[in-house]
Image: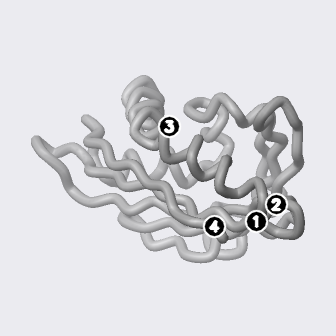
Amino acid sequence: MGGRFEGTVDIDRPVAEVFAFLANGENDRRFSPRVLEMAKRTDGPTGVGTVYASTVKDAGMKTRREFRITAFDPPGRIRWTEISKNLVTAEGGYDLEPGPGGGTRLRVFNDLEGHGVGKLLVGLALGAARKDADAFARRIKTAVEAS
């Protein structure tokens, strides 16, 4: 059985700017230390159907992952689903809305699901992700504000 982790943070940048930063999946390396590589696999601007491929390191293991953008509604919503076949897969998104002082309130979330032996591991992965969720949101804030 899987579950969700999420974090919320206020970013001192306008919604459109935060959306543009997050819409470029290659920026994930700038705020997620587990992402070693990230590359867009489809041509054209990011939108529904765009695929990003990554190499990530979790618990000392490297895995390759591919994600497809499933919803892209500027400037307030991005959704993705993992299309690679891993023991634990993710589906998630960003919700953005105007925040204090002209900034942005960002909510990031992921739903994790275990497959095969991954059903035994998903609880550990989810626990670690929930523990890090607020820090993860703050790392996004730091990366956006530094861009």
Label 2: element kind: helix
Residue 40 is left or right of residue 128, and the answer is right
Q: Earlier in the sequence, mark 3 or mark 2?
A: 2
Task: Report the Cα–Cα distance between label 3 and label 2.
Answer: 20 Å
Seen from this angle, which residue lies furthest front?
Answer: 120
Residue 35: image quadrant is top right
Instruction: Tell me the amino acid under the disc marked 4.
Output: Gly
Residue marked by disc 1: 114
| Figure check: 60 above or below 5 | above
How would you rate the neighbour count of disc 2 (Cα within 10 Å): few for under 14, some for 14-19, many for 20 or more?
some
Instruction: Tell me the amino acid under the disc marked 2.
Output: Gly
How would you rate the neighbour count of disc 3 (Cα within 10 Å): few for under 14, some for 14-19, many for 20 or more?
some
- Can residue 43 be seen here? no
Nearer the observer: mark 4 or 3; the answer is: 4
Residue marked by disc 4: 2
The tag on residue 132 is: 3
- Give how far across and how far down residue 16 sits, in percent: 35, 53
Residue 135: image quadrant is top left
Give me the residue at 39% from left, 46% from top. Answer: 18
Instruction: Tell me the amino acid under the disc marked 3.
Output: Asp
The tag on residue 38 is: none
Q: Earlier in the sequence, mark 2 or mark 4?
A: 4
| Figure check: 77 above or below 9 | below
How would you rate the neighbour count of disc 1 (Cα within 10 Å): few for under 14, some for 14-19, many for 20 or more?
many
